[in-house]
Amino acid sequence: MFILNFYKYNELMQNKLIINIILANLLWSFIPVVVEDLFLEVSIIMVIFLRFLISGFALLILAVILVFINNKRSKNETISLRLLFKNLLHKNRRFFDIKNISYYFYLGFFGIILNVIFFFLTLKTTSITFTMIGFLLSVIFIAFYEKGVNFEKFDIFKVLYIIILFFTIILLIFVGGTGAALRGRPLTLNGIIYLLIFSISISFLYIAINRDAYSMEETKIINKNKNYKIPRFLIKMSISFLMGVICMIPLALIIYILPIETDLTYEISTFFNQFSNFFVILSKWELIFLIIFSTIIPYLLIFLANVNWKSENLTYSQWSSILNVIDPMGSIIFSIIFVNEYFPHEILIIFIFLLGVTFVLRYSHEVKNLVQAVLLLKIKKGAINRITLHVFKYYGITSIIALVGIHDLLLNIKTSSIRDFYNLINTRLKPLTDIKNIEILFINKIVKSPN
């Protein structure tokens, strides 16, 4: 009975967390509709500056409040603010061994700020439909990147998935180009360049955002109090936002003084001129919506999903990548409803059908490539506690159970590819001299108790 209730609870929790990801994507999909009229009055640089400056401070304050509530109002293990900020100087072994502060800079500036700048420029100079091509292109870029570094193989599902995405992009080029011309924004070389830069930068964001690593001190705390992850993620994003915004200012100054006139030069000039109306602009409902409903709340939703994710099937990152088609689909549908975006209804049905097929194919691909296994470890005498804390931080290890008998530790493993699995075994675990033997048991199927 207990096992049955446990599985039901896990299923219910997973469904709720999937809804978190869906809601976050739906909130993001409102952005093009909200900024459509805002860009007529406010520089896109000012919109970005205010959105991420305020959101960065809000997430940082929220992280501190959550730490205080955890330490003063709950019985959970204490969370150290000192350790949270000390983590900024910890080396990130999953991102070229650079310090986390540098990792947050790359994430914030190249992954977020540049991404949003060129996303907004594409929106302003073309059409919403054409801009959505950037999201689909990024999916293809990431697929080829993962193939290039041998993270994944191209099975039949992945190949079909990419082919259908190409057809969908061609459809959006036709419809988006027509819609842009009808709005007096015919496609130009500049608009295409903005789209490509946006696609590349958002691809970097998707690749880099999960390349995080915990220090051994953090691993000890997480093992006692998983809620540590929430303020940790909030601080990660707040620092990324703030560093990205800070670095945007000198970049804006450099572009401003260059003798070449571009769309970005105009936006930067307007940005500096609008500083005297800082608080008036901040009070606009569109900007308030962007800060609260398109930044703070969506990130909280995905953080909560990430921290509490427990699934016998796909990981959080896999579900997140599968559901990212909701953003461009939602943006197009909302733009048709709210701002009368050009998109013939019969072609819209085809578009939704194609994205639905890509969803199914992507899910099939992820399920097929999911690797679940159990590792049984024999550890040298006196080294069990040390090894447990050391290996728990490795990607793919979801839980560790101490045993009595022939083996000392049982590791539950879940990775998105066989390459990741053997990388964990051969480059992370086998070199550890305290591990005497590793026995691998692959999980073929999980049978649940019947209702």
Image: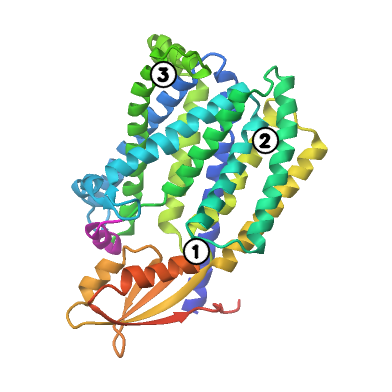
Q: Is residue 281 left or right of residue 224?
A: right
- Is disc 3 placed on a helix, strand or loop? helix
* Residue type pointed to by label 2: Ile
Magenta range = 214-224
- Is disc 2 placed on a helix, strand or loop? helix
Residue drawn at x 71%, y 50% as measured from the top left: 164
Residue 26: x, y in percent?
A: 58, 41
Residue 219 is covered by the magenta coloring: yes
Kindly give the residue lying farthest to the bottom in the view shown: 406
Q: Is residue 285 left or right of residue 364?
A: left
> From the viewer's perspective, is residue 115 above or below residue 264?
below
Q: Disc 3 marks which residue?
A: 255
State which tag comes first along the sequence, 2 or 1.
2
Q: Disc 1 marks which residue?
A: 416
The answer for how far apart the CA atoms under marks 3 and 2 are is 32 Å
Q: Are marks 2 and 1 in contact (CB under 8 Å)?
A: no
Residue 415: x, y in percent?
A: 46, 66
Point out the frontmost of discs 3 and 2.
3
Kindly give the residue lying farthest to the right in the view shown: 346
* Residue type pointed to by label 3: Ile
Q: Are marks 3 and 2 in contact (CB under 8 Å)?
A: no
Point out the frontmost of discs 3 and 1.
3
Report the front residue among 160 and 352.
Answer: 160
